[in-house]
Image: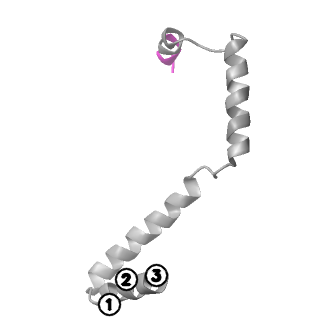
Amino acid sequence: MAKALERKLLQYFLQLNEAEKKSVLQMLKTFLKGREKRVPRISIEQYNKEIDEANARVEAGEYYTHEEIVRMAKDW
């Protein structure tokens, strides 16, 4: 499947003029650069651990209400 997709992409790419090829190349670079900014995926175990820790903080009263956040945001 991957090889067929690569062949199809190449087939279309070769039909483009130089300006279009440059545009597609820039688009591809943008896609790849966007990957660098993404947060790495974590395991389901790590995710569940972080959820449990967050729930414990809320149960301990360690949180801000919506109203508090709105007031804080005015100072940003």
Residue 47, position as x, y percentages in the image: 68, 40
Q: Could you give the CA–CA distance between mark 1 and mark 3, rounded to whole angstroms?
A: 20 Å
Q: Disc 1 marks which residue?
A: 14
Residue 43 is marked as none
Q: In this view, does 71 lie to the left or right of 25?
A: right
Front position among marks 3 and 2 = 3
Q: Disc 2 marks which residue?
A: 9
Residue 12, position as x, y percentages in the image: 30, 85
* Chain part drawn in magenta: 71-76
Q: In this view, does 20 lie above or below 36?
A: below
Residue at 46% of width from left, 81% of height from top? Answer: 1
Specify few, some or many for label 2: CA neighbours under 10 Å numbering under 14, 14-19, or 20 or more. few
Specify few, some or many for label 3: CA neighbours under 10 Å numbering under 14, 14-19, or 20 or more. few
Three-letter amino acid code at disc 1? Leu
Task: State yes or no: residue 6 in magenta.
Answer: no
Task: State yes or no: residue 72 in magenta.
Answer: yes
Residue 1 is marked as 3
Q: Is 44 or 25 nearer to us in this picture?
A: 44
Q: Could you give the CA–CA distance between mark 3 and mark 2, rounded to whole angstroms?
A: 12 Å
Q: What element carries label 2?
A: helix
Three-letter amino acid code at disc 2? Leu
Front position among marks 2 and 1 = 2
